[in-house]
Amino acid sequence: MVAAKKYKFDKYQVYTEAVQSPEHDARFLKTLYVKLVGRQPVTLREDFCGTHALARAWVDLSKDFKAVGVEIDPEPIKYGKERDKLELPPEKLPRLKVLRRNVLSAGLPKADLICAFNFSYFCFHSRALLLQYFKRVRSSLNRDGFFILDIFGGTQHGAPSCDTKRLPGMRYEFEQEFFDPISNSTRFYLNFYPRGQKARKRAFSYDWRMWSIPEVRDVLIDAGFKTTKVYWEGTARDGRGSGLYHPREKGESCQVWTAYIVAIP
């Protein structure tokens, strides 16, 4: 009798499955750019890119698209480059570059679209650092370019909480350890529980400041952006988020909400 092959836990793969949709996001960004600008984009810069799954999906979307990922941590960069060779044909690899740089660095590559997803800019706890980052982004946009960030909040996140979801063969938790209402500082963890395997608690940890939509919009204007738009997630019939986002000036008070902010120079 042949022994069953032992399941190898891949934290970056399950992270992608749990909290990312790179192919969907790439199509969304392309469609949004065409709608707002009236032509096809070419270059995407993915800040705080981690394993640069979105940048990889972007170059795979069109033979004309180019992408740059910016990340300071060498471990996910190395993992992502291994995935590049597995998921992209050789002729597409030259259109994808990854830089081990701080997003606050001067002289980063210019792009039609710059994004900061997975709430990554929440790592900036001070307004001064957030403003510095937004100014760097503003100076890196091509003509007709724009900057897009995601953001989340809701009454659930004003106190410790734990949101559990399921994947095939696994469940995972988005655990909030604490929330300080004076500083809006908080700490989150991603915990994974593979079926038949040991728990991987705190596989990822996040020391964040919970920024609000009006705060982020104000800092973007101070950084030199002329216009900001909020794309609010709609609600499906089951009461959960629909995954569809539309421009709104008013939202609903929800336990959990997500949105995008588009900043136009």
Image (tube, helix red, strand yellow):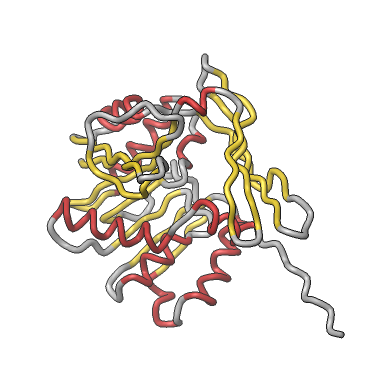
Q: Is residue 74 left or right of residue 201?
A: left
Residue 130: x %, y % from top left = 41, 32
Residue 122: x %, y % from top left = 48, 35
* Camera-side residue of 13 and 165: 165
Q: Quadrant of the C terminus?
A: top left
Q: Is residue 96 above or below residue 144?
A: below
Question: Which residue reaches farthest front?
Answer: 237
Q: Residue at x 55, y 64 (%)?
A: 80
Q: Is residue 113 left or right of residue 167?
A: left
Q: Residue at x 45, y 82 (%)?
A: 90
Residue 98: x %, y % from top left = 47, 61
Q: Is residue 162 above or below residue 114?
A: above
Residue 38: x %, y % from top left = 12, 57
Q: Quadrant of the N terminus?
A: bottom right
Q: How many marks?
A: 0
Question: Which residue reaches farthest right?
Answer: 1
* Camera-side residue of 256 and 215: 256
Q: Residue at x 41, y 44 (%)?
A: 238
